Amino acid sequence: MPGSEPGSGPGAGPCWTIRRASAAEIPAIVALEAEGFARPWNAAIYGEEIGRAGAWTLVAEGEGGAIVGFVCAWKVLDACHLLRIASRGELRGRGIGRALVEHLAGLARAAGCVHVELEVASQNAPAIRLYERCGFEVVGRRPRYYRDPVDDALLMNLPL
């Protein structure tokens, strides 16, 4: 089915559909983000992102319409800047994040982007592993970029 990506990895579950988020899904996105971010964005920010020109807010929808992951990114000139990504805690490691990144990369490529870029905390090993599996490479470092806790940001790039 177009837009669907199968789960993968040990204990993989059912398929999910990746599509643009709607305003009705903002509470689910905010709840997912609160599971994994020290400083989660609020509903007002996601309301702006969903309506922003040159932005993508995508959700992964699982069985029964449950939102199991999301990604938020901007098109800036010829780059796609990945801002936020998360999946439901108990489903992490099953390919949802990778499917979201791959779907976003396809949209970015179609929109004329030549790469996807992001910053990630240098101590966030699970996120770094995900990005490396998706083909990202570390291209720089911003010392003490994050404040709570203090950590460097790794700059990562995925050529399209």
Image: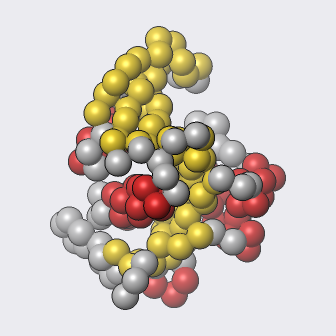
Residue 152 placed where, x, y %?
Answer: 45, 18
Q: Residue at x 55, y 64 (%)?
A: 58
Q: Is residue 140 above or below residue 11?
A: above
Report whether residue 46 is seen. Answer: no
Q: Quadrant of the N terminus?
A: bottom left
Please tell me whether residue 67 is drawn above or below residue 97 in the rendered image.
below
Q: Is residue 35 left or right of residue 98?
A: right
Taking the image as drawn, is residue 77 in sight?
yes
Determine the image quadrant of residue 26.
bottom right
* Residue at image coords 69%, 71%: 22
Please indicate whether residue 77 sits to the left or right of residue 151 in the image. Answer: right
Q: Residue at x 63, y 69 (%)?
A: 21
Q: Position of residue 33 (x, y in %)?
A: 58, 52
Viewer-proximal residue among 58 and 34: 58
Relative horizontal placement of residue 21, taking residue 115 as reference (left or right): right
- The image shows residue 151 at horizontal and vertical percentages of 47, 19
* Viewer-nearest residue: 30 or 105: 105
Residue 144 placement (x, y as % from top left): 51, 13
Q: State the colouring used for the structure image.
A: secondary structure
- In the rendered image, the residue lying farthest to the top is 143
Front position in the image: 144 or 91:
144
Residue at the spot 29% in from the left edge and 64% down from the top edge:
94
The outermost residue toward the front is: 112
